[in-house]
Image (tube, rainbow, N blue to C red):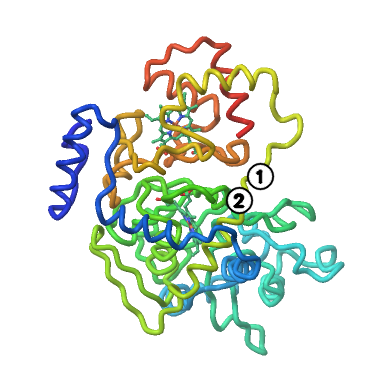
Amino acid sequence: MTASTHRAPPHRAFTTLIALALAAGGALTGCRMSTAEARATQATQRNRPHALSPALIEQGRQIFRYDTFGDEQQWTDRLRMHEVVETVPPVTALAVGLKVDADALPPGLLASADLDDPATTIALLKLDAVIGLKASISADNRITRLGITCALCHSTVDDSAAPGVGHRLDGWPNRDLDPGAIIALSPAVSDAAKAVYRSWGPGRYDPRFSIDGLSTPLVLPPAYGLQHVRNETYTGDGPVAYWNAYVAVTQMGGHGNFADPRLGIDIVQTPDLVTPKLPALRAYQLSLHAPVPPAGSYDAIAALRGRAVFAKNCKGCHVSATGTDNNSGRLHLPGETGMDGAYAARTATKAYRTTPLRGLWQHPPYFHDGSAATLADVVTHYDTALGLRLTPAQRSDLVEYLKTL
Ligand code: HEC
Ligand code: HEC
C-alpha cells in the first residue's frame, strides 16, 4: 500500500492518514471507509427491510423496467435521440444490442413483422416492448418523447422467441448492448465525444465520462445477488440507493437530486422524480437472486476440489456467503490484486471493492474493465499477481468451483 496510489481530497486527508497508519501497522491490508461512507452505510443498514414487502418489490419492478425519472430532458431535449430512433429498423436496433420483450407482443406479430422497416420499431415502442426504452408516439406515428430506464443496461432476454427477443431477465447485464455506439448516433454530440463513445464497445459503459471527461469504460455489472452486499459498484462508493441516484440523475439525466461532496457533485432539480422512488427500486434489486448455473455446466467433483483451492487462496478477501470483505469496510488498492488503477483514481474511494461473486457463469468478461475474458483468465491473473504457483490441476479445479457460484 502506497500513499501515492491513494489520493484523497483534502477534507479526507485526516481519515486517510488514520487508514494508512492502521494498514502500515498490519491491522488491515485494505483501506478503511471514510466517516462519510460509514455514515451512508449505517443509514442503509437502518433502512434495509428485514423482509422485503411484496408490494414494494412490485412497485420497484415497475420503476426498474418502465420509469425514466424524467430523463427525456436528456435523451429527447438535449441528445435528440427520438429523431434517430424513428429512422432505425429493428434489425439495426437488435444489432446494437437492444432487446425485445416477447411477453409484450400480441401473438403472431413476430412472424409477420418487417424487421427492416422503422415503422416496426415504432410499433414495438408503442407496445412498450423495447427493453429500457420508453417512448411517447403521436397520432401520426412520430416519436414525441423518448427516455431510458434502468432495464436498458441491467436486463436482457432469454432469446426464447428469436435472437434478442424473449422473456425479460431483470438484473442480468446486457453485455450485447453498445451504449456508446447508441449515444454516438446523437446529432447533438461533438465528433470528439463520438470518438470516445465509439471506443467503448458492447457491454461497456463509462459512468464518469460525462463528469470528468476521462474514459476507462466499465463492464456492465449484474444488478442481482446484492441482498447482503453493503456497498455497490466496483469501487464500493456507497449503498445501492446511493448509486441508483447517481446513475438516474447524472447518467440517465433524470429529473431529480443527487449530491456527493466527495465528487463535488450537487444537483438539485424540482420536482425530484428520483429520490422518492429509491426505496422501492432498492427492494426490487435486492429481491433479484443470482441465476443458478445450468445443469451439467460444471464438473461437481472437480468443483469440490476447487473449493479447497479457493478457501486457501481467495477467501481472505472473498469472505463468507456474499464473497466480499467490503461488508466489514475493506477496500483494496489496485496494486494489491494487480488491477489497473485508472478507473479507481476517478472515484470517491480510489480503491476496488472485492467483487461479490455471484452468477459468475453468466457474465463474462470479469473484473471492472473486463480484463479477464474467461474464468481461466481470472485464475491465471491471480496466479501471477499474487504469486500463488497453482498447479494446472488446481487451476482447472478452481475454475470449476467458480462456475458453481
Ligand atoms: C447506461 C447504462 C446503465 C444504466 C441505464 C444504468 N446503469 Fe447501473 N451500472 C452501469 C455501470 C457501467 C455500472 C458500474 C459502475 C461501477 O461499478 O462503478 C453500474 C452499476 C450498477 C449497480 C452496482 C452493481 C454492483 O454489483 O456493484 C447497480 C445495483 C445498478 N447499476 C443499478 C442500476 C439502476 C437501479 C439503474 C436505474 C436507476 C441503473 N443501474 C441504470 C450502467 C448502467
Ligand atoms: C486481496 C484481495 C483479493 C484476493 C486474495 C482475491 N480477490 Fe478476487 N477480487 C478482489 C477485488 C478487489 C476484485 C475487483 C477487481 C476489479 O474489478 O478490478 C476482485 C474480483 C474478482 C473476480 C471478478 C468478479 C466479476 O464479477 O467481475 C473474480 C472472479 C475473482 N475476484 C476471483 C478470485 C479468485 C478465484 C481468487 C483466488 C485465486 C481471488 N479472487 C482472490 C479481491 C481479491
Residue 7 numbered tag: none
Secondary structure at numbered mark 1: loop
Image coordinates of residue 337 in percent, x first then y, are 36, 29
Residue type (three-letter) at the residue carrying disc 2? Trp
Viewer-proximal residue among 137 and 142 = 137
Image quadrant where one finds the C terminus: top right
Position of residue 360 in the picture relative to residue 44 (left or right) = right
Which residue is located at x 43 percent, y 24 percent? 381
Image coordinates of residue 282 in percent, x first then y, are 52, 62
Viewer-proximal residue among 184 and 321 = 321
Find disc 2 in the rendering and name its residue.
172
Residue type (three-letter) at the residue carrying disc 1? Pro
Which residue is located at x 14 percent, y 41 percent? 17
> Which quarter is ligand 2 in?
top left
Marks 1/2: CA distance? 9 Å
The answer to whether mark 1 and mark 2 are in CB contact below 8 A is yes
Nearest to N terminus: mark 1 or mark 2: 2
Image quadrant where one finds the N terminus: top left
Other residues around mark 1 within 10 Å, as few (<14) / some (14–19) / many (≥20):
some
Viewer-proximal residue among 267 and 308 = 308
Q: Point out the frontmost of discs 1 and 2.
A: 1
Secondary structure at numbered mark 2: loop
Q: Which residue reaches farthest bottom? A: 139
Position of residue 220 in the picture relative to residue 360 (left or right) = left
Q: Visible in this render: residue 195?
A: no
Find disc 1 in the rendering and name its residue.
291
